[in-house]
Image (cartoon, helix red, strand yellow):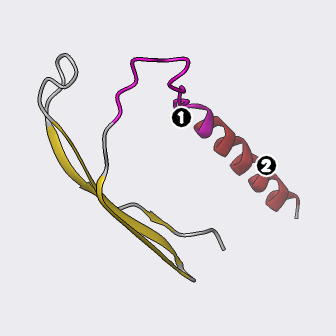
Protein backbone atom coordinates (compact mmCIF):
# COMPACT_ATOMS: atom_id res chain seq x y z
CA UNK A 1 0.00 0.00 0.00
CA UNK A 2 2.87 2.38 0.71
CA UNK A 3 4.19 1.70 -2.80
CA UNK A 4 0.83 2.73 -4.29
CA UNK A 5 0.89 5.98 -2.32
CA UNK A 6 4.45 6.73 -3.43
CA UNK A 7 3.59 6.00 -7.07
CA UNK A 8 0.57 8.31 -6.89
CA UNK A 9 2.64 11.04 -5.27
CA UNK A 10 5.36 10.79 -7.93
CA UNK A 11 2.77 10.79 -10.74
CA UNK A 12 1.16 13.92 -9.30
CA UNK A 13 4.53 15.67 -9.03
CA UNK A 14 5.38 14.72 -12.62
CA UNK A 15 2.05 16.08 -13.84
CA UNK A 16 2.51 19.44 -12.13
CA UNK A 17 6.11 19.67 -13.37
CA UNK A 18 5.18 18.96 -16.99
CA UNK A 19 2.14 21.27 -16.87
CA UNK A 20 4.26 24.16 -15.63
CA UNK A 21 6.35 23.94 -18.83
CA UNK A 22 3.30 24.70 -21.02
CA UNK A 23 3.40 28.32 -22.23
CA UNK A 24 0.69 30.54 -20.82
CA UNK A 25 -1.70 32.44 -23.07
CA UNK A 26 -1.55 36.23 -23.07
CA UNK A 27 -4.72 38.21 -23.63
CA UNK A 28 -5.02 40.77 -26.44
CA UNK A 29 -5.09 43.48 -23.78
CA UNK A 30 -1.61 42.67 -22.50
CA UNK A 31 0.05 41.52 -25.73
CA UNK A 32 -1.20 43.41 -28.77
CA UNK A 33 1.10 41.55 -31.19
CA UNK A 34 -0.65 38.15 -30.87
CA UNK A 35 -1.72 36.95 -34.33
CA UNK A 36 -5.31 35.87 -34.88
CA UNK A 37 -6.67 33.69 -37.66
CA UNK A 38 -10.24 33.37 -38.89
CA UNK A 39 -11.52 29.78 -38.69
CA UNK A 40 -13.77 28.68 -41.56
CA UNK A 41 -15.99 25.66 -42.22
CA UNK A 42 -16.37 25.04 -38.48
CA UNK A 43 -18.34 21.92 -37.47
CA UNK A 44 -18.66 20.22 -34.11
CA UNK A 45 -20.57 17.46 -32.42
CA UNK A 46 -20.68 15.44 -29.23
CA UNK A 47 -21.67 11.93 -28.24
CA UNK A 48 -21.57 10.09 -24.92
CA UNK A 49 -17.96 9.13 -25.76
CA UNK A 50 -16.65 12.67 -26.30
CA UNK A 51 -16.69 15.65 -28.65
CA UNK A 52 -15.03 16.40 -31.98
CA UNK A 53 -14.76 19.40 -34.25
CA UNK A 54 -13.32 20.27 -37.63
CA UNK A 55 -12.24 23.65 -39.01
CA UNK A 56 -9.82 25.27 -41.44
CA UNK A 57 -7.21 27.98 -40.83
CA UNK A 58 -5.25 29.86 -43.49
CA UNK A 59 -2.86 32.79 -43.74
CA UNK A 60 -0.88 34.20 -46.65
CA UNK A 61 2.92 34.17 -46.66
CA UNK A 62 4.23 37.35 -45.06
CA UNK A 63 1.05 37.87 -43.02
CA UNK A 64 3.55 38.41 -40.20
CA UNK A 65 7.16 39.34 -40.92
CA UNK A 66 9.11 36.21 -41.87
CA UNK A 67 6.13 33.88 -41.45
CA UNK A 68 5.34 31.28 -44.11
CA UNK A 69 1.84 30.90 -45.47
CA UNK A 70 -0.32 28.00 -44.40
CA UNK A 71 -3.64 26.37 -45.18
CA UNK A 72 -4.54 23.64 -42.69
CA UNK A 73 -7.51 21.59 -41.58
CA UNK A 74 -7.74 20.91 -37.84
CA UNK A 75 -9.71 18.07 -36.25
CA UNK A 76 -9.42 18.18 -32.45
CA UNK A 77 -11.06 15.42 -30.41
CA UNK A 78 -11.92 15.60 -26.71
CA UNK A 79 -12.49 12.39 -24.78
CA UNK A 80 -13.34 12.99 -21.11
CA UNK A 81 -11.40 11.06 -18.50
CA UNK A 82 -13.23 8.07 -17.10
- At mark 2, the secondary structure is helix
Would you identify the image quadrant in which residue 2 lies?
Answer: bottom right
Q: How busy is the neighbourhood of tag 1: few (under 14 within 10 Å), some, or many (20 plus)?
A: few
Residue under circle 1?
A: 22
Please tell me which of labels 2 and 1 falls first in the chain.
2
Q: Is residue 38 magenta?
A: no
Residue under circle 2?
A: 9
Q: From what the image shows, is residue 77 above or below residue 21?
A: below
Residue 7 horizontal side relative to residue 32, left or right: right
Would you identify the image quadrant in which residue 38 lies?
Answer: top left
**Residue 24 screen position, x and y as percent:** 55, 30
**Residue 60 screen position, x and y as percent:** 13, 33
**Residue 67 screen position, x and y as percent:** 18, 24
Task: Tell which residue pokes out farthest to the bottom in this image.
Answer: 48
Q: Is residue 35 magenta?
A: yes
Mark 2 and mark 1 residues within 8 Å of each other at the beta carbon: no
Q: From what the image shows, is residue 13 above or below residue 5?
A: above
Quadrant of the rendering where the N terminus is positioned: bottom right
Q: Name the residue at 66% across, 74% down.
A: 82
Residue nearer the viewer, 15 or 81: 81
- At mark 1, the secondary structure is loop
The segment highlighted magenta reads 19-36
In terms of secondary structure, what is the magenta stretch mainly? loop
Amino acid sequence: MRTDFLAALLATAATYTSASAIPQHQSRNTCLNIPTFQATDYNWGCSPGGCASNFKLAAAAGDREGAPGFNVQCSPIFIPAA
